[in-house]
Image (cartoon, helix red, strand yellow):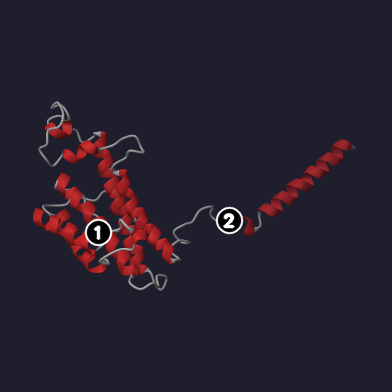
Amino acid sequence: MKKYTLTISLAIVFTMLFYSSCREKNLDLQPLTPTEASYFTEETDFNKAVLGVYAKLTDLYWYNGGSPIHGFWQLPGDDITSTGTYAFEIFGTLQPSSDENRTFYRVVYQLINRANTTLQKLSTEEGVITTANLKNSLRGETLFLRGYANFLLWNYYGTAPLITERIQSPDKIASPSSKDTELLDQAIKDLTEAAGLLPASRPSTNRGRVTSNSANGMLGKALVFR
């Protein structure tokens, strides 16, 4: 009798679980974190996206990750500061697979990807950003950061893939290398537009964010190199 009762009880439990699991509302689960579809619904979301582009600059120094790449900055110059054995000074033993080189290359393209995504979102934004001149300022900051990244790529490598739009399909992943001064020309274009969009100064609460003077200064450097 007890065995029969247990069997009936289990059958009822499993039947209830089966029917409750088949309800459509049980399958319509909300994401645990924001998604692209749910983001960019407030002004602050666009501001955070731009700050995310800035954040990649800190990775170029990588102290918190325990792998600083300061020696990499010597690559375009002729400074000799060691015993003459460091690859980024003497070039003869330089390998593309070096940690410093891989870190720089990865971080710069991550920055460009974030910039391209933010620029796409800003270009399709409709009515979310209502503060006067904020949209222009955010676009100017993003263009400055992308222009700076392309200037660095040209200065260190000469040619490397030039990516000016968000990658959203597999066929765009392996972009061909640029030619001649295409990276520098794009940097000049971005910095020129940024200079016309950015404010002349910032309040103390936003100290460190780029201004029109920042863009004009970087533009002047890029034009000298050009």
Above or below residue 170? Residue 190 is below
Instruction: Please state the horizontal and vertical placement of residue 80, each as a whole percent of the image.
Output: 12, 33
Residue receiving disc 2 = 29
182 or 58, which is in the foreground? Answer: 58
In screen coordinates, is 151 left or right of 12?
Answer: left
Q: Which amino acid does label 1 sit on?
A: Phe
Give the quadrant of the C terminus.
bottom left
User: Regarding mark 1 in the picture, which secondary structure is present there?
Assistant: helix
Instruction: Estimate how packed mark 1 is, as few (under 14), some (14 to 19) or many (20 or more) residues with alpha carbons within 10 Å.
Output: many
Instruction: Please state the horizontal and vertical placement of residue 174, each as a whole percent of the image.
Output: 26, 48
Above or below residue 95? Residue 216 is below
Residue receiving disc 1 = 144
Q: Can residue 162 be seen in this view?
A: no
Q: Which amino acid does label 2 sit on?
A: Leu
Residue 84: which quarter of the image?
Answer: top left
Give the quadrant of the N terminus.
top right
Tell me which numbered mark, 2 or 1, is placed earlier along the sequence: 2
Residue depicted at x 78% and y 43%: 10
Separation of marks 2 and 1 at Cα, in angstroms? 40 Å
165 or 81, which is in the foreground? Answer: 81
